[in-house]
């Protein structure tokens, strides 16, 4: 039963990725591919946040900072040092992993809103550095003309198609890695134990310091990878990547998708991003209002998000089965008592 459930989960994931890869080719258009590329990047970024906050319970408002570091590192290496963008992606993720270790040290003592404030301050520091270090980051106007991923076709439509498939493949592989770590390793079990009760987890021999740092490092690396993909697919990075609005959007997408599932926040990010971009034709203000309204409705009426709809059904089935088992057990006990009498 457990094996079949695991296989079914990965089959659903593989089917979703295959559908996402094939769907835009029904009506290929560069604008559509550009939207889907950004949706894939947001899915990876939101899934990386869920690994830290949804599974480990370490609430972070600083993931926009890791996102910006990854984007500026990848773009800066290509622009200033003419390094291959592929190396820039790896370097951005590695640097964010190292920074995540440094930022993770406050998490060893802080939790809740105290940790959230520390991470929010970290993201604001990154934004101010990006805005004022003009010689390296380009200042308020950001960086551009640093190229894209090499080896792609020159024709606009073919370029968009191949770039979308590459970004989707990398994002899907990174999300699959996060899902595997959280669901099929001892680290994932430790993450959930820390989220539920740190004192109890430590009393059972779990080294909460190591696992907190592990969660911060891996989560930051995935966010940095998302930043690098964003830089080479959009062609522009600016200080707004590290703004509080970016962190708020990450949090809203994760809540909409369902915390503590990895795939839920990734799906929520895709749906909310596409909805927000679709409403831009009505007006920029209206799409932000709709984004906030959806989050409010889900927080009030569906607090466990999209993933909670499926998990809630499974929970109801489990409870119904347990109730039926208790009823059968009680009936058999009464029969045995009558036979003894």
Image (cartoon, rainbow, N blue to C red):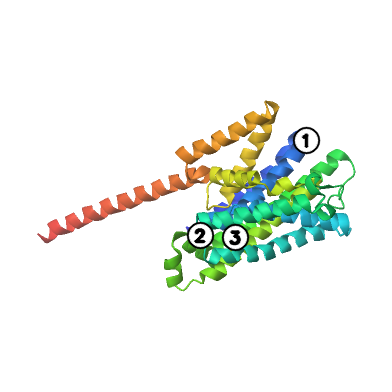
Mark 2 lies on residue: 111
Percent x, y of residue 233 = 79, 46
Label 3 – label 2 distance at C-alpha: 25 Å
Labels 3, 2: front one: 2
In percent of the image, x 12 and y 61: which residue is there?
340
**Sequence-earlier tag: 3 or 2:** 2
Q: What kind of element bears circle 1?
A: helix
Residue pointed to by mark 3: 180
Mark 2–mark 1 distance (CA, rounded to whole Å): 42 Å
Label 2: which secondary element: loop
**Residue 132 or residue 100, whichever sits in front:** 132
At x 48% / y 63%, what residue is drawn?
A: 194
- Which residue is label 1 attached to? 31
Label 3 and label 1: CA atoms lie apart by 33 Å
Of 259 and 174, the residue lying toward us: 259
Query: Where is residue 273 shown, x and y percent of the image?
Result: 65, 39
Residue 100 vs 24, above or below: the answer is: below
């Amino acid at each position: 039963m457990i094996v079949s459930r695991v296989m079914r989960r990965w089959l659903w994931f593989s089917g979703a990725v295959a559908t996402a890869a094939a769907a835009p080719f029904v009506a290929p258009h560069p604008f559509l591919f550009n939207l889907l590329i950004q949706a894939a990047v947001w899915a990876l970024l939101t899934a990386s946040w869920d690994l830290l906050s949804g599974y480990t319970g370490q609430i972070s408002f600083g993931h926009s900072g890791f996102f910006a570091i990854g984007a500026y590192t990848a773009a800066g290496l290509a622009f200033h040092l003419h390094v291959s963008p592929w190396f820039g992606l790896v370097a951005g993720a590695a640097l964010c992993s190292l920074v995540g270790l440094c930022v993770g040290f406050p998490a060893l003592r802080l939790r809740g809103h105290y940790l959230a404030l520390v991470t929010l301050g970290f993201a604001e520091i990154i934004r101010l550095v990006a805005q004022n270090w003009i010689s390296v980051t380009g200042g308020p106007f950001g960086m551009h003309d640093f190229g894209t991923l090499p080896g792609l076709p020159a024709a606009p439509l073919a370029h968009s198609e191949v770039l979308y498939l590459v970004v989707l493949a990398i994002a899907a592989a990174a999300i699959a890695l996060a899902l595997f770590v959280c669901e099929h390793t001892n680290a994932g079990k430790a993450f959930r134990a820390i989220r539920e009760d740190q004192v109890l987890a430590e009393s059972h021999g779990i080294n909460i310091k190591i696992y907190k740092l592990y969660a911060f490092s891996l989560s930051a690396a995935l966010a940095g990878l998302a930043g690098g993909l964003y830089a080479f697919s959009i062609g522009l990075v600016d200080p707004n990547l590290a703004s509080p609005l970016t962190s708020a959007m990450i949090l809203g997408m994760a809540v909409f998708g369902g915390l503590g599932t990895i795939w839920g926040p990734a799906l929520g990010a895709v749906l909310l991003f596409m909805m927000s971009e679709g409403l831009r034709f009505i007006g920029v203000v209206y799409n932000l209002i709709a984004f906030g309204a959806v989050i409010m409705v889900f927080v009030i009426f569906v607090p466990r998000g999209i993933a909670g709809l499926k998990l809630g059904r499974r929970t109801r089935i489990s409870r119904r089965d347990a109730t039926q088992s208790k009823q059968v057990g009680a009936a058999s006990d009464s029969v045995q008592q009558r036979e003894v009498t």
